[in-house]
């Protein structure tokens, strides 16, 4: 069986076309992209990636460049489960989260891409296959947009084929949040899927108050109402606020998701394949949610995550994220009347413009 012959990490800072904003990160002008190319002894290659909100990408790069090259040299590339655990325990003392798990996520993604490419199968099919057409929503990072700008952005997304919308909340004045959500609901009409995302802004009592105030707007979910370190608080918000809760983009392992689900703290588990431990961990989280009869959603990295949700019978919505890679990949995600279509190319099907990315470093 082919062994790993080379691990080639890349690190790029990508300016956003427009400045984005949310309640905790503030204004976001760029994000940092980490890639990793894994080649086996027969010359086949798989690609993985992760990203950060403008900081810590250098730490992820250093871990891939030093630790993964040392730990994974000469290993059998197809032994994905064994290599995941080898990396987890080799880096555990200084890891269990943060840049280490982001690096592991990218490396694991590359191994799955390599395996699917060698098999000549699209990733969603290799993972089991359910339905390559996945309901999707446009995830706006738009807290500071004026209301008319927010509605114009929404109209642009509707014209692109989206049939579900998420907007940011968490402004200094709850009344402003409520008025903006009411305006969005009126703009979209009754029954149109609408989500809101607070990006961990509130304390538990504030979040309960906000959820109750937003109840009349018929929301699909309230996302990340408080800090990810408080599953008991999320359980209270879900129980007393009266809105479904989506959470998980800041959870870093299967076991953190287990704690949330067991506590009754989440309605829509929301892993991010680039920071939860990769494809291996994402699929386990999705199966755990399925066992508890919960629908799974996603955060970020929509070009690869569409494959994962296409293999899940309990998928709900794919997030089409604001940190898109459209300018640097050959065939961006295709949206058709509210669904994203997982490509049928071997692997995850993402072909980076490596020359274009390298130009960012000059």
Image (cartoon, rainbow, N blue to C red):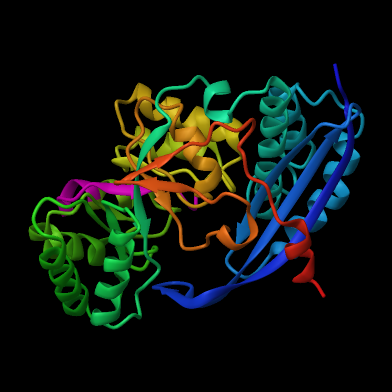
Q: Is residue 298 left or right of residue 87?
A: left
Q: Quadrant of residue 215?
A: bottom left
> Residue 209 at what x, y percent from top left?
17, 65
Q: Quadrant of residue 261?
A: top left
Q: Residue furthest top?
A: 1
Q: Identify the residue at horizontal 20%, vertical 75% (top origin).
A: 174
Q: Quadrant of the N terminus?
A: top right
Q: Is residue 226 left or right of residue 90?
A: left
Task: Work out whether 354 lies above or below 261.
Answer: below
Q: Is residue 307 left or right of residue 262?
A: right
Q: Identify the residue at horizontal 35%, vertical 58% (top origin).
A: 160
Please state the total of marks drawn on the protein image: 0
Q: Identify the residue at horizontal 72%, vertical 42% (top origin).
A: 47
Q: Is residue 181 visible?
A: yes
Q: Identify the residue at horizontal 52%, vertical 36% (top origin).
A: 343
> Residue 127 at what x, y percent from top left?
55, 23
Q: Which of 81 and 150 lies nearest the eye of the viewer? A: 150
67 is within the stretch colored magenta: no
Q: Is residue 172 visible?
A: no
> Residue 270 at what x, y percent from top left?
41, 44
> Residue 53 at what x, y percent from top left?
57, 66
Q: Quadrant of the C terminus?
A: bottom right
Magenta highlight range: 238-251
Q: Is residue 86 left or right of residue 276?
A: right
Task: Work out whether 299 lies above or below 31.
Answer: above
């Amino acid at each position: 069986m082919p062994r790993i012959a080379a691990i080639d990490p890349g690190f790029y800072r990508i300016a956003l076309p427009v400045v984005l904003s949310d309640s905790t990160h503030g204004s976001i002008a760029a994000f940092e992209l980490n890639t990793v190319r894994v080649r086996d002894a027969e010359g086949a290659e798989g690609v993985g990636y992760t990203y950060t909100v403008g900081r810590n990408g250098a730490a992820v790069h250093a871990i891939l460049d030093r630790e993964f090259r040392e730990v994974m040299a000469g290993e059998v590339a197809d032994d994905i489960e064994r290599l995941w655990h080898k990396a987890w325990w080799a880096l555990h003392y200084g890891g269990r989260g943060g840049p280490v798990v982001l690096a592991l996520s990218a490396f694991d993604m590359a191994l799955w891409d390599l395996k699917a490419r060698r098999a000549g199968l699209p990733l969603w099919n290799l993972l089991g296959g359910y339905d390559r057409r996945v309901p999707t929503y446009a995830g706006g990072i738009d807290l500071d947009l004026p209301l008319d700008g927010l509605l114009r952005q929404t109209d642009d997304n509707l014209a692109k084929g989206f049939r579900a919308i998420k907007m940011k909340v968490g402004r200094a004045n709850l009344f402003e949040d409520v008025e903006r959500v009411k305006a969005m609901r009126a703009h979209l009409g009754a029954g149109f899927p609408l989500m809101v995302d607070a990006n961990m802004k509130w304390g538990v009592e504030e979040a309960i108050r906000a959820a109750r105030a937003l109840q009349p707007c018929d929301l699909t979910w309230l996302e990340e109402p408080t800090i990810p370190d408080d599953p008991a608080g999320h359980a209270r918000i879900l129980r007393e606020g009266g809105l479904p809760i989506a959470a998980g983009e800041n959870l870093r392992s299967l076991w953190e998701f287990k704690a949330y689900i067991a506590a009754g703290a989440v309605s829509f588990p929301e892993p991010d394949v680039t920071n939860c431990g990769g494809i291996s961990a994402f699929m386990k989280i999705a199966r755990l949610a399925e066992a508890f009869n919960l629908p799974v959603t996603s955060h970020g990295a929509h070009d690869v995550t569409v494959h994962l949700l296409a293999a899940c019978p309990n998928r709900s919505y794919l997030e089409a994220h604001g940190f898109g890679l459209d300018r640097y990949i050959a065939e961006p995600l295709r949206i058709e009347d509210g669904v994203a279509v997982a490509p049928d190319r071997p692997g995850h099907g993402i072909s980076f413009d490596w020359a274009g990315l390298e130009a960012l470093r000059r």
